[in-house]
Image (cartoon, rainbow, N blue to C red):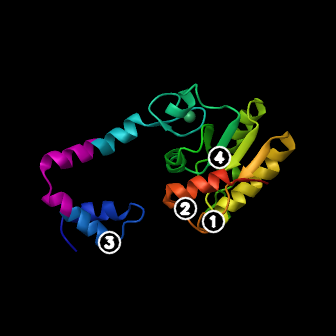
């Protein structure tokens, strides 16, 4: 529709999740009108995130070191482990201030239609962590949708024979929704009201 660089930018922005053609166009013209210093900072931040950000070698949360901030924190309990799909879910749960244990980030949820099976997630690494014997309770905080439920059920079957208490976040979370969009109060209540499965 447009020519050259502006259309390239619209196309690139349009490839981002949740950005439709209209939004891509609006963002592209925002960039065009913006201060060159701001645009340069955005471009450098985009490049830096790929260079600097790694995944924590223990929990697979995003980290700038070998271990993330949460895994490095000696004040947190090793006895409770919360399993989430993505790093953004760690942030959502941390905002509630309800949880002082550790996390394990799976990197997604079981989704046969998209070709995502247990081997594509960090389930083997989770089992290795659990076999070390510190964890007494495993909280399954996968999203309250079909894929998240399937993943929680799969993990519960795998982990229960190890004698670890397995719990799932309580209802109150919108079914079919995304954990990251739940407000702090709803998510906090769901945490307190988690039930053993
Ligand atoms: Zn970590």
- Residue 6 vs residue 12: left or right? left
Q: CA distance from mark 2 to mark 4?
A: 15 Å
Q: Which residue is mark 2?
A: 178
Residue 5 is one of the magenta-drawn residues: no
Q: Are marks 1 and 4 in contact (CB under 8 Å)?
A: no
Q: How packed is label 4: few (under 14 Cα within 10 Å), some, or many (20 or more)?
A: many
The part of the chain drawn in magenta is: 30-44
Residue 41 is one of the magenta-drawn residues: yes
Task: Say if residue 111 shows up in the picture.
Answer: no
> The N terminus lies in which quarter of the figure?
bottom left
Q: CA distance from mark 3 to mark 2?
A: 23 Å
Label 1 near ligand 1 (CB < 8 Å): no
Q: Are marks 4 and 3 in contact (CB under 8 Å)?
A: no
Q: Nearer the viewer, residue 184 or 166?
A: 184
Q: Nearer the viewer, residue 75 or 163?
A: 75
> The C terminus lies in which quarter of the figure?
bottom right
Label 3 near ligand 1 (CB < 8 Å): no
Q: How packed is label 3: few (under 14 Cα within 10 Å), some, or many (20 or more)?
A: some
Q: Are marks 2 and 1 in contact (CB under 8 Å)?
A: yes
State the SS at label 4.
Answer: strand
- Name which of mark 3 and mark 2 comes first in the sequence: 3
- Name which of mark 2 and mark 1 comes first in the sequence: 1
Rendering coords of residue 178 (x, y %)? 54, 62
Q: Which residue is mark 3?
A: 21
Residue placed at 65% from the left, 51% from the top?
Answer: 192
């Amino acid at each position: 529709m447009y020519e050259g660089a502006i259309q390239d930018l619209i196309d690139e922005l349009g490839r981002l999740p949740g950005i439709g053609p209209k939004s891509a166009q609006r963002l592209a013209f925002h960039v065009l009108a913006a201060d060159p210093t701001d645009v340069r900072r955005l471009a450098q931040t985009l490049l830096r995130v790929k260079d600097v950000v790694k995944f924590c070698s223990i929990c697979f949360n995003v980290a700038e070191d070998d271990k993330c901030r949460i895994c490095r924190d000696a004040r947190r309990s090793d006895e409770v482990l919360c399993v989430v799909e993505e790093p953004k879910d760690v942030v959502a749960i941390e905002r509630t201030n309800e949880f002082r244990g550790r996390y394990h980030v799976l990197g997604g949820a079981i989704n046969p239609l998209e070709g995502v099976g247990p081997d594509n997630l960090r389930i083997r690494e989770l089992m290795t962590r659990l076999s070390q014997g510190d964890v007494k309770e495993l909280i399954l905080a996968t999203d309250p949708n079909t894929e998240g439920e399937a993943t929680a059920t799969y993990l519960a079957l795998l982990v229960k024979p190890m004698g670890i208490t397995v719990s799932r976040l309580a209802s109150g979370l919108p079914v079919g929704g995304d954990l990251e969009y739940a407000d702090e109060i709803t998510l906090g209540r769901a945490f307190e009201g988690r039930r053993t499965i």
